[in-house]
Image (tube, helix red, strand yellow):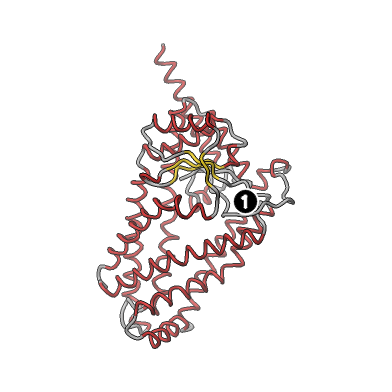
Amino acid sequence: MSDADPAAPRDEPSTTQPDPSKTPDREQQAREYEAIHNRLFVVRIGITVLALVIYFFSGASANLAEGLDARFGDQWWWTNTIYILVTLFAFSALMFPLTLFGDYYLEHRYGLSRQTLNGWFSDYLKELAIDLLLTTLFLAIVYALLRASPDWWWAWTTAVYVLLAVVLSAVWPVWIMPLFHKFEPLDDDALSRAVRAFAEASGLEVLGVYRWGLEEKTETANAALTGLGKTRRIILGDTMLEKYSKEEIISVLAHEVGHFKHRDIARMIVSGTVLAALGFYVAHRMLLLLVERFGFEQIGDIGAFPIFIFALFIFSLISMPLSNAYSRRREYAADAYAVRATGSAGPLVGALEKLADQNLADKEPAPWIEFLLHSHPSIRRRIKHAQRLDEEGSTSAVQTES
């Protein structure tokens, strides 16, 4: 729920990158950057659907499943696991050119990355290994549940999905993020004390305040409240520490604390659980409807995997505007908390303006783009919302005095 998404993990700085602050029309570049990413999103959808159709109707999926079944026999766990691993790896390879273009070439083209190709590829391989490990494990469990409980697997899968999400939220800042970035205790004592004091005054206990090493890989800025319970910590990107005032940094933290005070993590877990249950149930009905028609013996047959993934993929596309709309409501609420907690909209507005410029965010995308694709309100809408709250607060104070 951080205010700005960091660039994908990067490595060594490049000495040839232009200074993004010196570009003549930053907002025009932001609109172009947004438009290219939106087109890439559409292309990815098309390739995903086409790949699933070809994989299924060509018989490649069934042939792979049958070949592995002949090799492992009754050891269906190995058949399923290797099938999933091979399928995911092949899909990643298919998408690699788009990933290279979107995450490396495009970031350099717009002056957002400081990373060399070797550094980017190293991080890409680490990300791929983590994704393959976690996704293969989860899907192998799903297919075990399909066999063990063909009528209620979707409910059990929802429980596993939510449990995994909670566990990963707790361990991600401790085990995964340090694989891509350096984290050190914040060396600015005055800022660290101010951040801690604000968090503690809000009733938030944190492990510490950390300097997030972004600048060796990216020009973009970010800050976040990560982890759960004893792993909760405040991380401040060094690219933000260089350019933002103490008040602006506190306002960004106040936004994150707003999520904590409003119990947004619990809210998102509940809403995510509902959507996950619906998605898995849709996949359940789709499997029941189609597996026998295409010659599979049971819904747990791994050869029917493309049907399962297609159902989840289409459901996620249809439900994405709904989940994004709810997320935007929570972001507005967190902004409102930040304005009230800091006593003014000024620092938050200043931080949002800087984040938009530094991260090349389109401040005012088309309403339909925002509705369909954005989990955060546009920067322009957030600024207007914060300023309106500030004006309402000033009006209320004058009326109280009078």
Left/right of residue 339 with respect to residue 160 in the rendered view = right
Q: Residue at x 67, y 57 (%)?
A: 116
Question: Which residue corresponds to mark 1?
Answer: 217
- Residue 172 sits above or below residue 292 on the image: above
| The residue positioned farthest toward the top in the image shown | 402
Relative vertical location of residue 219 with respect to residue 67 in this rendering, above or below: above
Q: Position of residue 125 (x, y in %)?
A: 56, 64
Q: Secondary structure under badge 1?
A: loop
Which residue reaches farthest bottom? 70
The spot of residue 389 in percent (x, y) is: 46, 29
User: Residue placed at 57% from the left, 59% from the top?
Assistant: 123
The amino acid at mark 1 is Lys
Q: Residue at x 47, y 27 (%)?
A: 342
Q: In which image quadrant can residue 78 be found?
A: bottom left
Residue 85 at x, y = what percent?
Answer: 45, 73
The image quarter in which residue 402 lies: top left
Relative to 306, does residue 214 appear above or below in the rendering? above
Q: Nearer the viewer, residue 35 or 83?
A: 83
Residue 260 visible here:
yes
**Residue at left offset 44%, top offset 51%:** 174
Is residue 50 among the parts visible in the rendering?
Answer: no
Residue 381: x %, y % from top left = 52, 39
Q: Is residue 339 above or below residue 115?
A: above
